[in-house]
Amino acid sequence: MSATASRTIEHVTIECCQGDITRQPDMDAVVNAANAELMPGGGVAGAIHRAAGRGLAEECRPQAPIRPGEAVITGGHDLPNRHIIHCLGPIYGVDRPEADLLARCYHNALSLAEANALTRIAFPAISAGAFGYPLEPAAEVALSSVRQFGGDDMRTFQNLRHIRFVLFSAADRDAFSAALHRLAG
C-alpha cells in the first residue's frame, strides 16, 4: 500500500499514515490512547505525556478515573496541538462488549472535537497495542465509527474537516488504509 491513504467523503478528509502521534503540528487535537488514571504509561500514553510535559498529568488528575469508552479533553501543553483528547479503549477479552466500547471511544472523541469547534484531529489505533485488540477488527471499528458519527452525508461534522489516523507501523497503516478503502469504496 502507499505511504498515506486518503479519502474525502463529502467535506471531510480521512487519512491514514504511519508516523508519530506527538508530531502532528497541523492538527488541532491529538487523541491519547489513555489508561483509566490518565497518567503516563507505556505506548501512546507514555509518548504523549513525555512530549506534553508535567503539566498534562496535573491537568488530568482531577478528571480521572475514566471508564472504557469514555473520553475527556485537556490542553495540549508542550505539544504543538491546542488539545489532547484522552480515550480509554477496551482491553480485548476483558472489557465487553469490546466493539461497542471501542466505537464509543471514537464517538466520544469526535463529540468533544465538535463541541470544542476543532477542525482537525489525529487518532492512534486505540486499544490495538498493549490492550490486545486485533488490528484488523480495530481498524474496521475505527473507520466505521467515524462514518457512523458523520452520517451518510457527513453533516454531523459541523466543524471537523480532517481526521487523521496516525499509525505506529507500516502494518498498522496498511490495515487502517484497507478499512478506509472499504469504507469509502
Image (spheres, helix red, strand yellow):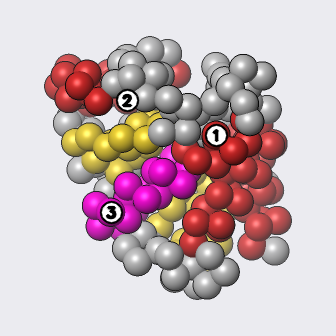
Relative side of 75 to 125, left or right = left
Instruction: Identify the mark nearer the N-term, 2 or 3.
Output: 2
| Residue displayed at 65% across by 72% down | 7
* Label tally: 3
Q: Nearer the viewer, residue 76 or 17?
A: 76
Between the residue at mark 3 and the residue at mark 1, the CA separation in whole angstroms equals 21 Å
**What residue sits right under mark 1 in the picture?**
101
**What residue sits right under mark 3 in the picture?**
115
Rendered image quadrant of residue 114: bottom left
Q: Which residues are magenta?
A: 106-123
Asked if residue 50 shows in the view, the reply is yes
Rendered image quadrant of residue 22: top left
- How crowded pointer 1 is (Cα within 10 Å; few <14, some 14-19, many 20+) is rated as many
Give the amino acid type for the residue marked by disc 3 in the picture: Ala
Residue 54, horizontal then vertical, whole percent:
20, 20
Give the amino acid type for the residue marked by disc 2 in the picture: Ile
The N terminus sits in image quarter: bottom right
**What residue sits right under mark 2 in the picture?**
48
Residue 29 versus residue 78 in the image, above or below: below
Q: Is residue 52 on the magenta stretch?
A: no
- How crowded pointer 2 is (Cα within 10 Å; few <14, some 14-19, many 20+) is rated as many
Between the residue at mark 2 and the residue at mark 3, the CA separation in whole angstroms equals 22 Å
